[in-house]
Amino acid sequence: MEPITSSERKSLKKTVIQEIKTYIIDNGLKAGDKLPTERKFTEMFGVSRSVVREALSYMENTDVIRVRQGQGAFLNESNIDTLLNSFFFLWQINGGSVRDIQSLRVIFECSAIDDIIRDHKQIDLDQLKKTVEDGKQAETEEEYKQADISFHKQLLHTTNNKLFIQMTHMITTYFFDIIHIQLSPEEYQRANNEHDHIVKAISNRQAEQAKKLLTDHIKKTRDY
């Protein structure tokens, strides 16, 4: 029998990864559920234990599962941070621009406004208003930045769409990580006032007005 080549081993690992994912779906496993042992997977798929171990290691590194020493492998909560982190890193080193991220933020946050106005849950609107009020207490450059981030993340969180929140929070965080914004007290006051006007338009169910205010607000970022 010829030794298994490197390319064949990689292909075998990919096959086992897909088989494990199929097993998880077919058996209705949820976050926190334990996966079968390496030995069990070896018997199920007819491959060596080392191949199964490599497949599980890949799934752990991509946050699909977590391995507890002496206990086994467990399915993780859905989290796309690792995937998006890798994507944005590659996007940035291949010539991605801040303007692209700004445009993406406008699309997502305007979509969030439509969802918020459609569902109109007062408790969520109240939390958004509180975020604006809390932002008035900011006194330093770092507090200005965190208050600005908090407003946009709370706006997205108000949609109550878990996947949407994960995706858009990652985009917002990445944007503020790669662009260095330094606001004077006057500039921050103006930005927080814009947050307030956006929330008031949402509360009054004026979707187009709220989206216009938001779009203008985000586009001003590069002017600071």
Image (tube, rainbow, N blue to C red):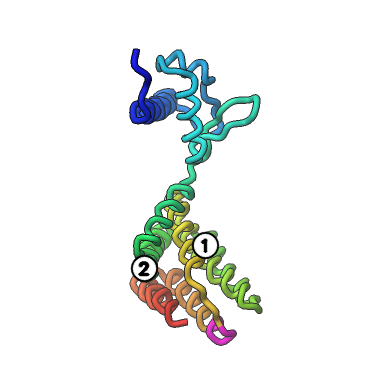
Residue 28, placed above or below residue 138: above
Q: Looking at the picture, does residue 149 appear above or below residue 70?
A: below
Q: Which residue is mark 1?
A: 154
Please name the amino acid that badge 2 sits on: Ser
Q: Quadrant of residue 141?
A: bottom right
Residue type pointed to by label 1: Gln
Q: Tell me what residue is drawn at x 51 percent, y 65 percent.
A: 177
Q: Secondary structure at mark 1?
A: helix
| Image coords of residue 98 (percent x, y) | 39, 69
The residue lying toward the viewer, choosing from 69 and 160, is 69
Q: Earlier in the sequence, mark 1 or mark 2?
A: 2
Residue at the extreme bottom of the image, as rendered? 186
Along the line of sight, the residue nearer the viewer: 82 or 203? 82
Q: Secondary structure at mark 2?
A: loop
Q: What range of the chain is rendered magenta? A: 184-189
Main secondary structure along the magenta-highlighted residues: helix
**Residue at figure coordinates x 39%, y 61% from the top left:** 93
Residue 89, image quadrant: bottom left
Front residue of 164 and 102? 102
At a point 47% along the width and 74% down the height, the residue shown is: 200
Q: Nearer the viewer, mark 1 or mark 2?
A: 2
Is any part of residue 18 visible from this angle? no
Q: Position of residue 164 (x, y in %)?
A: 42, 52
Q: Which mark is residue 134?
A: none
Name the residue carrying label 2.
97
